[in-house]
Amino acid sequence: GNSVTQMEGPVTLSEEAFLTINCTYTATGYPSLFWYVQYPGEGLQLLLKATKADDKGSNKGFEATYRKETTSFHLEKGSVQVSDSAVYFCALSDRDQGAQKLVFGQGTRLTINP
Amino acid sequence: SQTIHQWPATLVQPVGSPLSLECTVEGTSNPNLYWYRQAAGRGLQLLFYSVGIGQISSEVPQNLSASRPQDRQFILSSKKLLLSDSGFYLCAWSTRTGYNSPLHFGNGTRLTVT
């Protein structure tokens, strides 16, 4: 079945550091790929998405490129802020009977120190 | 604009007691609805999804059930809670059309079974 693997956390960085959170996937067909972010005590929010190979999703300074050849969708940000501290989830879409079922990675907790 | 409401935000229940978590969506019609669970230190697991009133698909065998009595209402239930039912429960919705439509999550219910 489809699956998503994220780099193990937690990740701790200093403010203005460069961020990479690795994500690889296994899927049949051509899924869409997503990054969601979860701030403390809240639900998940969509951060960015890419729907086909070589697409780049971007939002709030974060970027991720859909790499079909390496089955990856790594999340990057050039200069992180304290407010980026959260749990980040990589996910792929798996459609079944009209429902948009998302398969999530295990999440990566990111802490940014001032 | 669309909004999703979940309640209660937190719940502490003894083993063997019943459970009812409710989720409602406003500002959209005919949504797909989902229940996810996030266990401590783990990723998100899809429990149930629904593409219409009275239509429920279960992803994993468990002690829980779901119902959709109205178009924009989704209920998660249990007759007798187990310790292993503790976790963070998230309701989500997506549009019916669009393979790439994102899921929109509520703020979740933290359930502790004692």
Image (cartoon, helix red, strand yellow):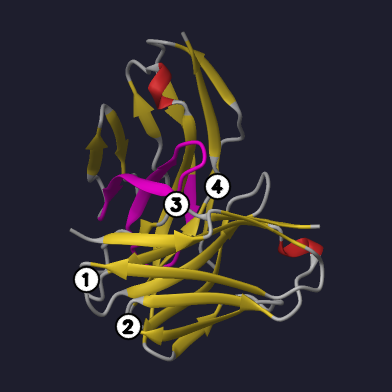
Badge 1 is on which residue? B28
Mark 2 is on which residue type? Answer: Asp
Q: Foreground mark, 4 or 3?
A: 3
At label 3, counting other C-alpha atoms closer than 10 Å, the crowd grade (few under 14, some 14-19, many 20 or more) is many
Residue A69 visible to an observer of this rendering: no
Residue A10 visible to an observer of this rendering: yes
Residue at the image position 25 percent from the left and 55 percent from the top: A51
Q: Foreground mark, 1 or 4?
A: 1
Mark 4 is on which residue type? Answer: Thr
Badge 3 is on which residue? B107
Residue B78: mark: none
Q: Nearer the viewer, residue A68 or A84?
A: A84
Residue at the image position 71 percent from the left and 81 percent from the top: B79
Q: Are marks 3 and 1 in contact (CB under 8 Å)?
A: no
At label 1, counting other C-alpha atoms closer than 10 Å, the crowd grade (few under 14, some 14-19, many 20 or more) is some
Pointer 3 or 1: first along the chain: 1
Mark 1 is on which residue type? Answer: Thr
Q: Is residue B70 magenta?
A: no
Residue B65 image position (x, y, % from top left): 60, 81
Badge 4 is on which residue? A5
Q: Which residues are magenta?
A: A24-51
Check if mark 2 and mark 1 are on a common chain.
yes
Mark 3 is on which residue type? Answer: Asn
Check if mark 3 and mark 1 are on a common chain.
yes
Q: Are marks 1 and 4 in contact (CB under 8 Å)?
A: no
Residue B91 image position (x, y, % from top left): 46, 63
**Is disc 1 placed on a helix, strand or loop?**
loop
Chain at tag 4: A
